[in-house]
Image: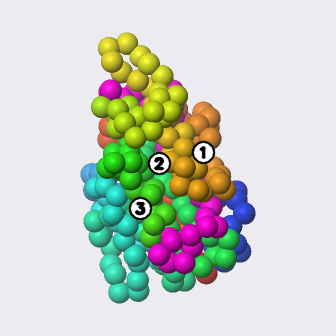
């Protein structure tokens, strides 16, 4: 039996969402047990079995991307297959699940109050920072607006590396503060020019700046930290060789 996180938010009834954890699959260590990533060295037959379990639990088709830590948003349609190079996806079609794989990066799920569209974004620090203050979250919101959802967006933030575990160099801090000086508050100094960064906090700040006020999920507390909860979450930073979880959102 899988151990999914189900978002607690005010999404319309036709919107379904979940985020998998590491429990409930057939993969062997160090991918134990519900690894959904085909690219991490796990046995292909184990990944295939885990993905089939996911499909059965959702009664929808998860569309996996080839994530590149960028900002491109892919519009899902019935004739588009798996593995498209992008870091976010969006659909207005029932039965197709926007799906993001993570193992420390932040998954963000989106919908609107009418439940006419859903989207999912993969927000590692590079994609979140983007270029000139425009990253993957802003690009996803632009795509949502183009799909008719401009002012009634809600977002759920899933588990990611927490603010006590995400040690980064000064180039990461500079990428965010160059266009938002107040983002400095989300970096705590360490010795040697290093910082502890609050990835979920940076995402919340970006979303609020873009007008999204209904924010749910990851608040930066310890239960959401992938590194600090090895029994429940995969973490590449912690383990180096690690499985992948999936955050999925779809319309019924």
State the quadrant of the N terminus: bottom right
Q: Position of residue 50 (x, y in %)?
A: 44, 63
User: Which residue lies under the disc numbered 3?
Assistant: 139
Residue 218's label in the rendered image is: 1
Q: Can residue 22 be seen here?
A: no
**Is 150 located above or below residue 137 in the figure?**
below
State the quadrant of the C terminus: bottom right
**Is 52 located above or below residue 220 in the figure?**
below
Mark 2 vs mark 3, CA separation in Å: 16 Å
| SS under mark 2 | strand
Q: Position of 104 compared to 158: left or right? A: left
In the depicted view, which residue is nearer to us: 25 or 198?
Answer: 198
User: Which residue lies under the disc numbered 2?
Assistant: 106
The answer to whether marks 2 and 1 mark residues whose Cβ atoms lie closer than 8 Å is yes
Q: Can residue 193 be seen here?
A: yes
Q: Position of 247 compared to 129: left or right? A: right
């Amino acid at each position: 039996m899988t151990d999914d996180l189900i978002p607690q938010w005010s999404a319309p009834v036709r919107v379904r969402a979940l985020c998998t954890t590491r429990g409930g699959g057939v993969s062997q260590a160090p991918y134990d047990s519900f690894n959904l990533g085909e690219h991490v060295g796990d046995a292909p037959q184990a990944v295939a079995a885990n993905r089939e379990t996911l499909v059965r639990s959702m009664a929808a088709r998860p569309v996996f991307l080839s994530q590149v830590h960028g900002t491109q948003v892919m519009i899902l349609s019935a004739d588009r297959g798996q593995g498209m190079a992008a870091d976010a996806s969006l659909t207005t079609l029932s039965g197709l699940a926007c799906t993001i794989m993570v193992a420390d990066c932040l998954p963000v799920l989106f919908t609107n109050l009418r439940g006419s569209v859903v989207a999912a974004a993969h927000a590692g620090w590079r994609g979140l920072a983007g270029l000139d203050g425009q990253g993957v979250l802003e690009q996803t919101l632009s795509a949502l607006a183009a799909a008719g959802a401009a002012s009634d967006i809600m977002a759920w933030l899933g588990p990611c590396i927490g603010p006590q575990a995400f040690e980064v160099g000064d180039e990461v801090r500079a990428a965010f503060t160059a266009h938002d000086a107040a983002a400095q508050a989300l970096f705590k100094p360490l010795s040697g020019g290093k910082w502890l960064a609050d990835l979920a906090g940076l995402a919340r700040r970006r979303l609020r700046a873009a007008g999204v006020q209904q924010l749910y999920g990851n608040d930066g507390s310890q239960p959401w930290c992938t590194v600090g909860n090895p029994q429940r979450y995969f973490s590449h930073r912690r383990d180096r060789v690690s499985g992948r979880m999936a955050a999925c959102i779809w319309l019924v």
